[in-house]
Amino acid sequence: MDGKKSSPFCSVGTQCETKNFWFSTLRARLGYAADRILFYGTAGGALADVAAGQSGNFQRTTKGGWTAGAGLEAAFTENLTGRIEYLYLKLGNSTCTSPAACGSDLGLPGGTSNPNDTVKFSTSMIRVGLDYKFH
């Protein structure tokens, strides 16, 4: 979930960057089983440690949001299953404050001393898993 957004107020090369350090989800699955294959949809809540900033000056925060996706799980043996799923993760927005050298300090119209960019945190991912069930 790393991304960059150029600030409209600053010189070329000044970008708001986002980073994700970890995320966790709590989801429900609802599906249809056909023989040894389960087709399912999944949705629930998400929590992540994210950061936004410029020039290596990041502010970390924990953000809440939601996730949804779909997948399939197949049983290879009584104990061994494999799965593949797609997940979309959407977290809350953050503000990326530009350095004081931006905006009106550069004489740009409509600029301020510390213009802010709104950064959206979202990502898509494909996950593959192998599960062993103990009896």
Image (cartoon, rainbow, N blue to C red):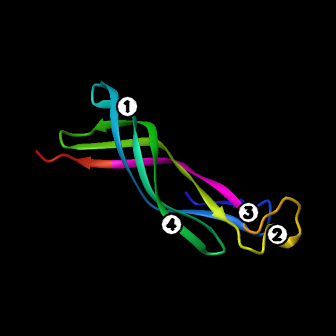
Q: CA distance from mark 1 to mark 2?
A: 48 Å
**Magenta region:** 115-129
The Cα–Cα distance between marks 4 and 3, rounded to whole angstroms, is 19 Å
Magenta span: helix, strand or loop, mainly?
strand
* Of the image marks 3 and 2, the number of the one nearer the N terminus: 2
Look at the picture and state if 75 lies above or below 21.
above
Q: Nearer the viewer, residue 32 or 122?
A: 122
| Point 78% across, 75% down: residue | 101
Which residue is tagged 2? 11
Query: Would residue 75 appear left or right of 68 to someone viewing this image?
Result: left
Q: What secondary structure is marked by label 2?
A: loop
Q: CA distance from mark 1 to mark 4?
A: 34 Å
Q: Are marks 3 and 2 in contact (CB under 8 Å)?
A: no
Instruction: Check contact, mark 4 vs mark 2: CB within 8 A.
Output: no
The answer to which image quadrant residue 53 occupies is bottom right
| Crowd around label 1: few <14 · some 14–19 · many ≥20 (10 Å) | some
Q: CA distance from mark 3 to mark 2?
A: 13 Å
Spatial CA span between label 3 and label 1 = 44 Å
Identify the mark at residue 40; answer none if there is no mark.
1
Residue named by callout 4: 60
Q: Amino acid at mark 3?
A: Pro
* Dot 1: element: strand
- In the displayed structure image, the side of residue 46 where residue 96 appears, left or right: right
**In terms of secondary structure, where does tag 4 sit?**
strand
**Label 4 crowd bin: few (<14), some (14–19), many (20+), radius 10 Å:** some
Which numbered disc flags the more N-terminal residue, 4 or 2?
2
Residue 125 in the magenta stretch? The answer is yes
Left/right of residue 74 with respect to residue 126 in the rendered view: left
Q: Residue at x 35, y 41 (%)?
A: 27
Q: Of the residues shown, which amino acid type is indicated by label 1?
A: Tyr
Which labelled disc corresponds to residue 115? 3
